Amino acid sequence: MVQVTPIRRAPVSLVPARLSASDLLRLGGFGLRSRPLRVVLSALGIAIGIAAMVAVVGISSSSQANLERALAAMGSNMLSITPGDTMFGDAATLPDGAVGMIERIAPVTAASATGAVPGKSVYRSEKIPKGQSGGLSLMAAQLDLPETVGAGLARGTWINAATERYPTVVLGAEAAKTLGDVPTVYIDGRRYEVVGVLDDVALAPELDTAVLIGWPAAKSYLGFDGHATTIYTRSVESQVENVRAVLAATTNPESPEAVKVTIPSPILKAKQATKQSFNSLLLGLGAVALLVGGIGVANTMVISVLERRAEIGLRRSLGATRGQIRTQFVTESLLLSLIGGTGGVLVGFAVTAIYATTQDWPTVVPLWAVGGGVGATLLIGAVAGLYPAIRAARLAPTEALATP
């Protein structure tokens, strides 16, 4: 009789099936489709929060873009150069070729100058006593001065290549009010024809009380020495501070300390301060909106876990691991947040476009706001869904199935 020895086999360990990304999306989508009204309301809460954030960012950015455009038109990229004092306390002078040297600076887009003509007074009639100057100043001006300082003409024309050598003048806005509507003025006993009147010059108010004459005519008729007393420059917006740093040494390489460089108005600093305040405001409002959305997601997912205990118990009984249960509910939370976040971004962009159009602003929605809105909702969804997912995974199969 043959004795048969039984074959001993090693115990087989069961390995749970792995869920693919498509399986997770189907599971998460099924959980959302089974309760459409709750999903819509929860997504709507997220969408409102994200739409508010994107709309606030977009409207503020559009307003800021409009403000920057207005500031650029006013001259936030303009600098002025004037003589300083020498080491002995005497008034310095700017070199003759200073304007040409400044124009060689790469970011400088325009440069022009005026030169004071001292000891000369302007009168509307030769019968006015010489002691009554009216507080007006006489300045020689280069042809491209209006374009550089942003000056417009109230009437008449500006000095041109044909008239800059002859006794013709242009009056500043206040000078025209002081002298009245006169066709000619008198300087040093000579009659000068008035060819134009300037509007108020916001960036160079010293021109408002000035009588401006062509550079060659000032030399020929009034003994002007040809030295500029103020040079105005325009630069590329982003390079203003860099240009400012090298202007003194470029204007007067031998004595840069005898040159003063100033911004005609505090526009640039105000612009920078405005930008910083906008950013701080937006960050605060965005954080509040995301917090509200996250609370809504967490609330929805907690209720979902409580209502779906039987489903969780059945899946655990069929072999689903705790990790798979956690991943399922986190995925569901992410999908819910993504739906609300995407809808909120679209609504926020539409609100920004409509409001900006009504205000005649450029529509500006920063990419960081769009990407940040979607990314932040995913992050909030993951965090908000983590606790409900962990709670669902801890349910024992028997306890979950016993839940009515």
Image (cartoon, rainbow, N blue to C red):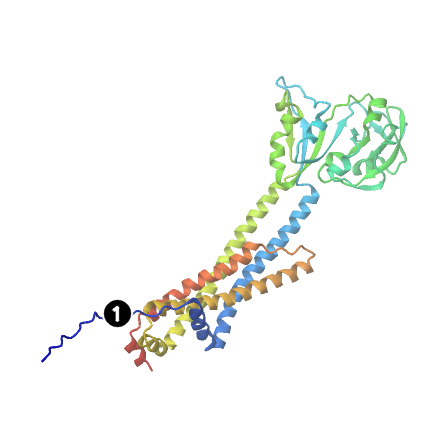
Outermost residue, top side: 88
Asked which quadrant contains residue 20, the reply is: bottom left
In the picture, which quadrant includes the N terminus?
bottom left
Count of all numbered marks drawn on residues in the image: 1
- Note whether 159 is above or below 313 in the view shown: above
Q: Label 1, secondary structure: give it.
A: loop
Q: Residue at x 47, y 76 (%)?
A: 33
The percent coordinates of residue 99 (x first, y second) are 72, 28
Q: Residue furthest bottom?
A: 404
Q: Which of the 4 image quarters holds residue 132?
A: top right
Quarter of the image for the C terminus: give it. bottom left
Please say if 280 is above or below 378: above
In this view, the residue in front, 12 or 138, is 12
Residue at image coords 70%, 31%: 103
Q: Where is residue 110 in the image (x, y as percent from the top left)?
A: 72, 35
Amino acid type, residue under disc 1 in the picture: Ser
Residue 138 in sight from this viewpoint: no
- The crowd level at tag 1 (other Cα within 10 Å; few <14, some 14-19, many 20+) is few
**Residue 140 appears at what percent x and percent y?**
79, 28
Quadrant for residue 158, please give it. Answer: top right
1 to 72, vertically: above or below: below
Is residue 65 shown left or right of residue 315? right
| Residue 249 seen by the camera | yes
Along the horizontal axis of the image, is 110 left or right of 298?
right
Q: Is residue 217 shown above or below 57?
A: above
Please report the residue visible at 62 percent of the width from the left and 51 percent of the height from the top.
Answer: 64
Residue ID at (72%, 40%): 202
Q: Name the residue under label 1.
A: 13
**How far across and down, in percent of the image, does residue 169 sit?**
85, 32
